[in-house]
Each structure stands twice: as structure tokens, then as C-alpha cells.
Image (cartoon, helix red, strand yellow):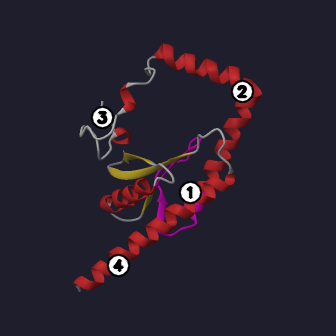
Amino acid sequence: MDPEYLKHENQGSGLVKDYMHWVIPMGRRFRSLKLWFVFRMYGLSGLQAFIRKHVELAKTFENLVRGDNNFEICAEVVMGLVCFRLKGSDELNKALLKQITRTGKIYLVPCRLRGRFVLRFVVCGRTTELRHIQEAWKHITELSSKLLQNLFDHEGKEN
């Protein structure tokens, strides 16, 4: 098992502990136990409100992405998951993800979708609010602008 979203640049280096194998397994019994705890904590109406709020926040993020000509939505937004990418090559999107990860302000998980490298923004935090979505988008667009400017400057110098 080595899906795209579990890969990282320090994988297998021994520099960092990979806690992926240290958690409660994702087997059927343990998934149901986790779900039981969620139901106990929120109750049915609380869980419904929680999910509705996160779907709304994901739609807000989707609208921000759609409003920027440098980005594209890559799949239908489902629940709190928004799959998007910077228009351009996979390498450009990998560089953007690397910059985002390096800052440590937000964490995005990549995947391959129809053969392309895609960034996944997931709204799932218990305390996530609209301001967090707006701050994340501002951060992503600032880093992408710098990346595109550096790319443009580099290409201009070669010509």
C-alpha cells in the first residue's frame, strides 16, 4: 500500500517517524468503533449540522477556486472534498504542493485523477470556520502567484 496521498519526501529515510502504521487499523471493526464515538459525541442532529456546515465550507472553497483563472476544479465537490489544481503541468502542481507543505500553515493531500496530479483540499476539522477557508485560499494564491512569477521570470531570462 503506497497511495499518492501517503507519500512524502522523507519516506523511508529514517529522518521522521511514519505514524501511518501506529494508529488503530482501518479494518471494519475499528472503523465502526470510530463511528460509534462520533455518534456518541455529536448525536444525530449534531452530526447532521456538522456535515452540512462542512459541505457549505467546501462549496465556498470551490467558488474561490472557480473564481481564479489560474486554477481549475478537477472533480465534482463531494462532502468536504475539493479536488483542484493550478492550470499547467504536474511538475508545477508538485512544486506548489511542496511550497505549501514547507510553510506548514495548511496541509493538502495529493492524488492522481485521470492521470493528472491533483491537490485535495478537505474540510474536516471540528473547529473549521469560514475564516480558515479564506485564509487557506489566500495562502494558496499567494504561493501560486510567487511560483508563477518565478516561472515567468525564469522563462523570460532563457529567451
Q: Which residue is depicted at the point 33% across and 81% down? A: 153
Which amino acid type is shown beneath numbered disc 3? Asp
Kindly identify the residue that appears in the image at 70 percent across and 40 percent down.
52
Q: Secondary structure at mark 3?
A: loop
Q: Which residue is mark 2?
A: 42
Q: Nearer the viewer, residue 6 or 69?
A: 6
| Upstream in sequence: badge 3 or badge 1 | 3
Separation of disc 3 and disc 4 at Cα?
34 Å
Q: For the residue carrying disc 4, how many other residues have a C-alpha within 10 Å: few (<14), some (14-19), or many (20+)?
A: few
Near-viewer residue (82 or 140): 140
Q: Secondary structure at mark 1?
A: helix
Instruction: Answer above or below: position of 128 versus 72.
Output: above
- State which tag comes first along the sequence, 4 or 1: 1
Q: Earlier in the sequence, mark 4 or mark 2?
A: 2
Q: Which residue is mark 1?
A: 136
Q: Residue furthest right?
A: 45
What mark, if any, has residue 152 been given in the picture? 4
- Residue type at mark 1: give it: Ala
Q: Residue 105's spot in the image, x, y percent?
A: 51, 54
Q: Earlier in the sequence, mark 1 or mark 2?
A: 2
The residue under label 3 is: 2
| Residues at marks 3 and 4 touching, judged by CB atoms closer than 8 Å | no
Amino acid type, mark 4: Phe
Local SS, label 2: helix
Please state which of residues 32 and 132 is positioned toward the viewer in this rendering.
132
